[in-house]
Image (tube, rainbow, N blue to C red):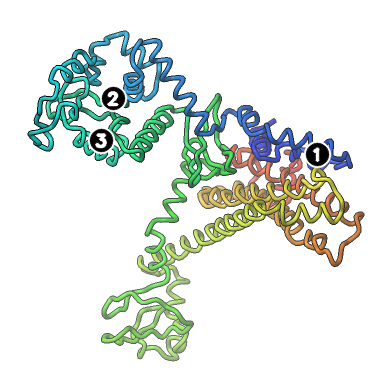
Amino acid sequence: MDDGEDWFEEYCAESDCSDYGLEDAGSSDYDHAGDQDEQQNDAHVEEEPAASSARHGYVVMSEAEVRERQEVEVSSICSVLQVPRAWACALLVRYDWDLGRVQDAWFTNEEAVRGDLGLLLEGDVGRRAVALGKKLLKCRICLEDECPCDQMSSAACGHLFCDVCWGVYIHTAVADGPGCLTLRCPDPGCRVIISRDMVERFATDEDAHKYSRYLFRSFVGGDKKLKWCPAPDCQFVVELVEGEVFDVRCRCSHCFCWNCGEEAHRPVGCETVAKWALKNSTEAENTEWILAYCKPCPKCHRQIEKNAGCMHMTCRAPCRYEFCWLCLGAWFRHGESTGGFYACNVYKHAKEAGEMDEEDLRRRRARDSMERYTHYFERWAANHMSRQKALGVLAGLEEEQVERLKDMYSQPHGQLKFVKEAWLQIAECRRVLKWSYTYGYYLAPGDGREKEFFEYLQGEAEAQLDILHSCAENQIRHFLDSTACPPLEEFLRYRSRLVGSTSVVQHYFKNLVRALESGLKQVELPPEAGASGVAALFHELDI
């Protein structure tokens, strides 16, 4: 099976409807197996997320599962190195939670590691505080002269400060961000680290929670095989298990690219997506628009936009200069000799003769570039919007459509999954189609055969997707109308039609993905081949 097909089936397996059989949608008989099959399918869906994702090279974990793994690694370092938990945390943060690096560094030169991190044994610091008894001491932060000894504390270094100053010091450090994980003694010349135990002792509940979050996030950020799901407010973590992974589907249903963290964008590469995002956000497009649709007044050089059909332009006050939009000549010189007041044939003749100056050529190139970009961007945006609407339909599908069909036609839930299957296919194919327009924009314009092949693939896939989308969105309304209530036989015919259309669309998009990911390498048409040649190529490739 080729990469394009692997990817599509990977998507089907990762979705919460992996047992719907998208790869065999056209052959599904949807027999009336009853509630037993429905229960078996539901049980399969419940255990699907972890098992399915593991089969495809990654595992999605909850925060609790990741914290358990973090505690295991901390305990492992404590056991192997025979150090306190606070030290183990400090060592793991320092070496990005790499157990191998921690052990190598520690056993190679323990003294150097302890000196670098400021890990000192408590020694007789506690006995010293007891020996001081109720003696009043001076805090070297707030300079309070009468601090009771039992209200003074120190790290392993023995530098005593009052508990109030410790609380303020730790609060400030936690508020500053993750740097609090390597917090040092407040004494200017001391490098001893402030342990996690001491932070938790003096921190408020809010600060202690923040510190714990920083420690947890350092664990995820330090492991190259772990990544947060980039969806807003999502708390799931994805672990790369093996192999090369491109698109990841989180339990929150968000799909993203493992490599760049952006929205899933196969079959387009990460570099192309980055260029497209930059182009959509840069001011360069505004500049091209100005060059294409604005011209400077010949007298005052102020930029003027042509917002009407007439070629007679009048600059703003106080200039008020009147000129021709086409040739930028004074308007009073235009008449019958120049083709009339509304057509400058002098300019047309110069353009036809190739005598346009550099500025005119630059404007024409800018206009062509802008029109080409607009063509692809509009279609990219339209498919993005269609996908968002499809996801919205999916979110309320069970309550709005499936339950109503179940009541109207007395069908078990398992026999109505074809509706959700179709919408899952629509949402995913809209995403692929959206990024195919980005691919088309950056397709080298020199090779007409590649462009022809790409547009044929894209056009055929888009046409089939539009048919499926219409069938799922419009034709189903007839069967949701409780007043009309079409007969069961008609509904079963509609189900077969929708299932078949879903299968056909998947087939077309598999071929589109396969071709784009291979760089359209299958194109070996002779220069004189036209549409018939493309059709012949499709027949050879079994497309």
**x then y, percent, for residue 134:** 13, 25
Q: In the visual, does 63 lie left or right of 515?
A: left
Question: What residue did someone put label 2 on?
Answer: 195
Q: Secondary structure at mark 2?
A: loop
Amino acid beneath label 2? Ser
- Depth check: 121 or 536 in front? 121
Q: Earlier in the sequence, mark 1 or mark 3?
A: 1
Q: At which x and y percent is residue 382? A: 58, 59
Toward the viewer: 335 or 318?
318
Q: Residue at x 50, y 45 (%)?
A: 231
Tell me, yes or no, whether the two marked residues, 1 and 3, touch with CB atoms within 8 Å: no
78 in relation to 363, above or below = above
| Residue at the (10%, 28%) spot, across then down | 136
Identify the residue under disc 1. Answer: 38
Q: Earlier in the sequence, mark 1 or mark 2?
A: 1
Q: Which mark is residue 504?
A: none
Per the model, the C-alpha gap separating discs 1 and 3 is 56 Å
State the CA–CA distance, disc 2 to disc 3. 11 Å
- Dividing the image into 4 quarters, which one contains the C terminus? top right
The tally of labels here is 3
Do the residues under discs 2 and 3 have CB atoms within 8 angstroms? no
Q: Furthest residue to the front? A: 134
Check disc 3 and report the residue beneath it.
170
User: Please, what secondary structure does the residue beneath circle 1 have?
Assistant: helix
Q: Report the amino acid beneath label 3.
A: Ile
- Give the image quarter of residue 154: top left
Determine crowd level at label 3: few under 14, some 14-19, many 20+ residues with C-alpha closer than 10 A.
many
CA distance for labels 1 and 2: 55 Å
* Quadrant in the picture for residue 341: bottom left
Badge 1, how many Cα within 10 Å: few under 14, some, many 20+?
Answer: some
